[in-house]
Amino acid sequence: MADNMTVNREMFNDVMVPNYNPASMIPVKGEGARVWDQDGREYVDFAGGIAVNCLGHCHPAMVSALQEQSQKLWHLSNVFTNGPAIRLAKKLTEATFADRVYYANSGAEANEAALKLARRWAIEKHGEHKQKIIAFTKGFHGRTFFTVTVGGQPAYSDGFGPKPGGVDHVDYNNIDALKALISDDTCAVMMEPLQGEGGVVSPDVEFVKAVRELCDQNNALLIFDEVQTGFGRTGSLYAYEQLGVTPDILTSAKALGGGFPIGAMLTTTEIAEHLKPGTHGSTYGGNPLACAVSEAVFDIVNTKETLDGVKQREQWFKEQLAAINEKYNVFSEIRGQGLLLGAAMNKEYEGRARDFLLAGQEHGVMVLIAGANVVRFTPSLVISEEDVKEGLQRFEKAVAQVVGQ
């Protein structure tokens, strides 16, 4: 039995490193798109654990997969393989461009593997000169020192001493800037097919196609970071399908486990061959528990019903957010795709996204921000229409409160 120690928010400050500043309430239970805190207050969850809880909280298929696997095998290490890992990899490769899968525990680790693989491929295939990586300003690729350097937000990477070298940044959607920078020394271009943390910024389809062409012309790999966009979030299994552009390497995490930590890097046979035994690894990567849960999530997400349902839910959100905005005039636009949506502040409310998040909590709805100017919504992909309506009614009260202040 768990210790019945009573915890409160003040204890967090006493025992945790202060790199987070969590809400004043502590959630204790979740079901579907609803969450309850210690005081029994109920919230509609439009945050989804930052695009992770793609089937909501405690989905029966996930609970059952975890319970079943927990009585068979928890952990082996990669000295051995296991059934769930192989089955999931088979499903992922059959559903995507990829032939090979590497497992990790998080998006940052999947991206770290992608970047190391790209460098290894380039150096072995083309020589030591080919090691430059190009990424995009306001991009986000994780918090390891390599991935945070490739991410285009200096606020996250400054202040830790010398950064890994050979990394350059250009503005998203600016093909001329990329054209000017890319060369025979470039080993990879890394991008999100829709920027999440950077403000929910969609790419121009022509821009993405031009990036692919420039990579081909310069023998560089195209890496798609689909940690946030992937696994149904935009209305297809992966966002690259909707852009009509295929990457060489794709990374996946967040929704991949529906709440159980797992990450994956997907690539082709030819590129994968450059990670020979001993070149890279992960103690927990491909863990049977994680893969069993992920397989259960895959079987629900990768269906016409769920993916079409995401597009339907996108319309519910966009229509109701537009109606709220007509009344209160706080957003300049509602952007994004599927259930990765952002309400961008207009000039009058610039820099105040967090005020809406905090007011939302007061009124029983959980939302996110993407920078200081965008309120972000990443709810469950199977959230009911009733929950969307109820959550947005609460969000409207939060908007009214902020406007009235």
Image: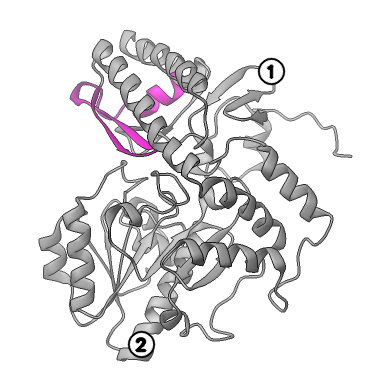
Where the C terminus falls, by quadrant? top left
- Of the two numbered discs 1 and 2 in the rendering, the one whose residue sits closer to the viewer: 2
Does the magenta run of residues contain 200? no
Does the magenta run of residues contain 349? yes
Coordinates of residue 268 in the picture (x, y in percent): 43, 75
| Residue pictured at 54% horizontal, 39% vertical | 49
Type of the residue with mark 1:
Asp
| Residue pictured at 28% horizontal, 21% vertical | 322
Type of the residue with mark 2:
Ile
Coordinates of residue 313 in the picture (x, y in percent): 41, 30
Q: Residues within 10 Å of mark 1 (few under 14, many from 20)?
A: few
Coordinates of residue 250 in the picture (x, y in percent): 41, 64
* Picture quadrant of residue 64: top right
Disc with the residue nearer the chain's start (1 vs 2):
1
Q: Is residue 275 above or below residue 290?
A: below
* Picture quadrant of residue 102: bottom right
| Residue pictured at 19% horizontal, 50% vertical | 204
Q: Mark 1 and mark 2: span between their CA atoms?
A: 57 Å
Q: Is residue 209 above or below residue 401?
A: below
Q: Residue furthest top?
A: 404
Q: Magenta part of the protein: which range?
A: 331-359
Residue marked by disc 2 = 123
7 and 254: which is toward the camera: 254
Q: Which mark is residue 199?
A: none
Left or right: residue 225 versus residue 281 is left
Local SS, label 1: loop
Where the N terminus falls, by quadrant? top right
Local SS, label 2: helix
Q: Residues within 10 Å of mark 2 (few under 14, many from 20)?
A: some
Residue marked by disc 1 = 39
Q: Is residue 335 visible?
A: yes
91 and 210: which is toward the camera: 91
